[in-house]
Image: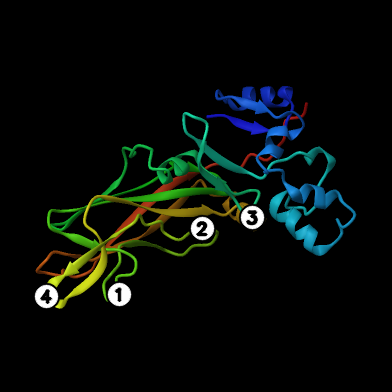
Amino acid sequence: MAAISYDAPAVLRAFAQQRGITFPLLSDAESATIRSFGLLNPAVEWGLGPDRDDPAIATEVRRLVSAAGRASEMMRGMALPGTLMLDRRGRVTARFFEDFYVDRNTVASVLVRAGSGDKPVSATRISSEQVELTAFVSDAEVAPGNRVSIVLDVVPKKGMHVYAPGAAGYKVIGLTLDAQPFVKPLPMIHPPSEIYHFQPLNERVPVFQKAVRLTQDVLIEGTAPAQAAWREKTTVTLAGRVEYQACDDKVCYSPVSAPVSFAVALKRLITERIKQ
């Protein structure tokens, strides 16, 4: 893992020492690499240009650069925040970018969405005669603006299936989180399903018959009101219900709703900048 920024080596060195960072922090002279990847943050130039007082420009600067809605000269060369994953030949295999400058995908969330990452020691296990299910959250600690993942590892037992998106009239497997301020559940990521032919009714429906991993991303909002609300808290609890319906080739069982809850430590968002 390595991080690339437009900051000078001295700034990066001081930041790494202060924060105990041991992976490489690479200084991109004149943002050459940032430009070559097409990732130069355009809102900085807009915010410093002749139209900087345009309300639409201020909105974009507020979204991509600064909550104050103003850009400064020291921001020139800044990249759009994101993560690129490369294979051993240097080819980009996945990319993860944000719509708001405070939002950040955590490393653990990126790994589980990419199909990697180990299960933590603490996980919720839901077992029935039809399905074995393990639920866990990607991160034990988050900061405002972090995007984390709740993972459902689903293993239908022999001869069983659970229903996938598009299965009309059945309870599709998923996770419903309890609503709370400044916690934003994102659409669940389902892997490709397969079509099951239920011969007695000549019915074809999308299902999961083999072990699958479902990912529910959750954004711990980092807007100014959200940061104010989180300031006095030390944990955030993500609670909800795993819902599914399992069937075999003869019996369709009643829908299941099982509670899950994850208490995640809440840390402070680092906003101060190391000066050269």
In the picture of the structure, the residue carrying the numbered disc 4 is 200
At label 1, which amino acid type do we have?
Ala
User: Marks 2 and 4, how far apart in space?
Assistant: 44 Å
In the picture of the structure, the residue carrying the numbered disc 1 is 168
- Label 4 Cα crowd, 10 Å radius (few <14 / some 14-19 / many 20+): few
In the picture of the structure, the residue carrying the numbered disc 2 is 183
User: Marks 3 and 2, how far apart in space?
Assistant: 11 Å
Nearest-to-viewer mark from 3 and 4: 4
Q: Which residue does the image show at 12% across and 53% down from the upper left?
A: 158
Numbered circle sitting on residue 223: 3
User: Marks 1 and 2, how far apart in space?
Assistant: 29 Å
The location of residue 104, given as percent across then percent down, is 57, 46
Which tag, 3 or 4, sits closer to the chain's start?
Answer: 4
- Label 2 Cα crowd, 10 Å radius (few <14 / some 14-19 / many 20+): many
Do the CB atoms of the residues marked 2 and 4 lie less than 8 Å apart?
Answer: no
Which tag, 3 or 1, sits closer to the chain's start?
Answer: 1
At label 3, which amino acid type do we have?
Thr
Nearest-to-viewer mark from 3 and 1: 1
